[in-house]
Image (cartoon, rainbow, N blue to C red):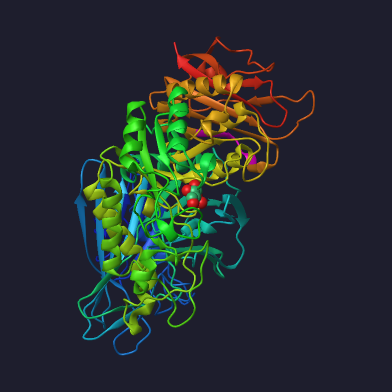
Amino acid sequence: MKILLTALACLFPTIGIMAENKIISVDTDKTSMVMQVNPDGKLIHDYYGKKFNGIEPFLIKQYKEQPDNGAGYAPMAYPAYGGLVSIQPALKLTHKDGVQTTDLRYDSHKVTQIDDNREKTEIVLTDPLYDIKVILDYTAYKKEDIITESVTVLNNETGKIAVENIAASYLPLHADDYYLTHFNGIWAAEMQLKEDKLTPGIKSIESKKGLQTTAASNPAFMVSLNQPLNENNGEVYAGALAWSGNFKNTFEIDECDRLHIVAGPNDFASTYYLEPGESLTTPEMIWAYSNTGSGTASRNFHDWVRNYNIAHPEEERAIVLNSWEGAYFDFNEKTITDMIDDAAAIGVEMFVLDDGWFGNGEYARNSDHAGLGDWQVNTEKLPKGIDYLAKYAKNKGLKFGIWIEPEMVNPQSELAQAHPEWIVKSGKRDKIEMRNQLVLDLSNPEVQDFIVTTFDNVLKQSPDISYVKWDANRYISDFGSEYLPEDKQSHFWIDYINGLYAVCDRIREMYPDVTIQLCSSGGARLDMGALKYHDEFWTSDNTNAMDRIFIQYSTNLFYPSLATAAHVSTAPNHQTGLIAPLKFRFDVASSGRLGLELQPKDLKGKEREFAENAIKTYKQIRPIVHHGDLYRLKNPYDGKGWASHQYVSKDKSKAVFFAYSLKYHGRTTYFDTKLQGLDPDKNYRITELNPQGWNKFYGDGQVFPGDYLMNAGISLNIGNPMESTVLLLEEI
Ligand code: GLA
């Protein structure tokens, strides 16, 4: 971060720059976000892009293009509604006296070095007429080239103010064309990649579903300037809001063809009242800029997540057998111990007991109609309890995990009878069930305590529980809280999520070592806010390998592979009926965090042998998949019927390459690609992994220079639907 007090009049004598001008630059190793205080004291956004030496001329630019010059737009760093701001504002307040406008002026700023890699810049803005403070809080992550921003508004007025809209960040851009890549989907088809060329007006990507952030749209996006998103070239702005609740990211092209991005919690039914002395802080918005396409921005996000925003990044994720698709609700002790036996025999490292283990009597969890909220072991199904199963797994060399859904309650439960006041509902209206369940009101501290205690009690069942799958199988529809006062019902959306984070903070303090999987009807809650408390996420209930190629491709644009739970399930697939070869299923799942989601005793003969081998192979490539750099080579969304990507270890000594054929390509067509990210001067021995069938890679066992592989490339003998190749490259 640099401050340039403008003694530049001598450098640019004809321009006559005002002495008060000041530049504030938030810098990473390769990018800069430049702001400037203009003579009126307004904080102007000058630039976000490639870092370069000599940013002083921004002072000239701002002098020539005076903001607020009548064009109706000032490229402010954080536009509040008021003055000439007519775009979607980042902040909209009603002051104590009913006045609707705010005029933010620079007050002061402070730069703090957190450590070698992180620098914090705090800019305080005030309004000359109203006693409020708006604090813009930036953190630059140097080597990851990530800049985060969050905003705090502090009310020092003599009465209550209403915060009607508060964004975490605002970014203005100016180019000829803007292409927005975003993610949209539904249960079992999450994170479908969409790209739209933006047109004048506002496009809003948002959620009003409360806790299921990603049940439709994800709060992460990329904007590519002047051309559709490309992996390897072009200017790309990647943004992700770290918020697990209602969000709203708007993209507005104004009358001057300028794009305004406003990202933050959704203002929908969310007016937040601040009493004197109270403040409100937004979640963080995370930004990356790349002038070498989406690949760089994506890798920057992966590095940032692995360094700062996920639990236990250094630990290799265990290979899981999850009981859901193999047993559903229909199991007893023997079903589970048999599954553990089979899992142990083929090299699985963790057994996870999914839904169905709790609730008793009339509320036994034998279907999704009852039991949620009653987190006591079902003594009929599992008379020896959880500790017996966890110890059984331990004796077989497996770790043990368990499923919970602690934010939810079935009306058919003891909890619902005991605490009807804890349930989210809209006043006297009938409660609306989804999957026969209702949501607990996490804005209520008593409910927060209950969830922390539930987690604690579940884990206390056995010292050998080392993994928890935390699910949330519905969204919030008709909101309302018996805990919040009548005039603060609109605090619900924000207080719920802050309540959830408070619970997560407490749980992480109590159980820092436990692995926690983030799950919500598959991948309906996937965002940087929740991810930070978790080790991994359940990417989708759709385990069909063909669909997973698409889901994992777009998910991994932001969220890294080590966290992407990908399970091999049975054929025909339970969600889609597709019959995919076992090799294809393994080759797709092995590019994330490998697991199984089936009844392992159904794997017999050659299939079992193949599975055992593929699990062994995965253990060999796991460090590269988990910690390597991801290069996408072929995009499944381009309609050409191929998908391919590579992970390269940080020291470029190893790589693993995946290629999939999604359709029939014609008899004489084969797959050609150039590899990426290798060291041109290194020689690599290639080994084909999980080989099967006639289409063996000609280069298996051969040595190729990195330069050759990245320029001449390789050809593969795949071209039928659901054929795949996996190659390991090792420096010799
Ligand atoms: C959700 C999850 C599944 C499974 C079921 C159990 O749908 O995504 O993996 O845990 O709940 O009810």
List the single residue furthest toward the right.
667
- Residue 328's spot in the image, x, y percent? 52, 45
- The C terminus sits in image quarter: top left
Q: Relative to the observer, which residue lies in front, 191 or 587?
A: 587
List the single residue furthest toward the bottom.
97
Report whether 161 appears left or right of 353. left
Q: Relative to the observer, which residue lies in front, 424 or 731?
A: 424
- Residue 696's spot in the image, x, y percent? 65, 15
Determine which quarter of the picture holds residue 603: top right
Report whether 215 appears left or right of 57. right
Q: Relative to the observer, which residue lies in front, 629 or 627?
A: 627
- Residue 373's spot in the image, x, y percent? 38, 60
Residue visible at 71% across and 32% down in the picture: 721
The reply to whether residue 46 is in sight is yes
Report whether 447 appears left or right of 622. left
Determine which quarter of the picture holds residue 640: top right
Q: Relative to the observer, which residue lies in front, 628 or 446?
A: 446
Q: How many numbered marks are there?
A: 0
| Residue 731 falls inside the magenta stretch | no
The reply to whether residue 629 is in sight is no
Report whether 248 appears left or right of 580. left
- Establish if 245 lies above or below 304: below
| Residue 635 falls inside the magenta stretch | yes
- The residue segment tinted magenta is 631-636
Classified by dominant secondary structure, the portion drawn in magenta counts as: strand
- Establish if 334 lies above or below 347: below
- Residue 258's spot in the image, x, y percent? 52, 63
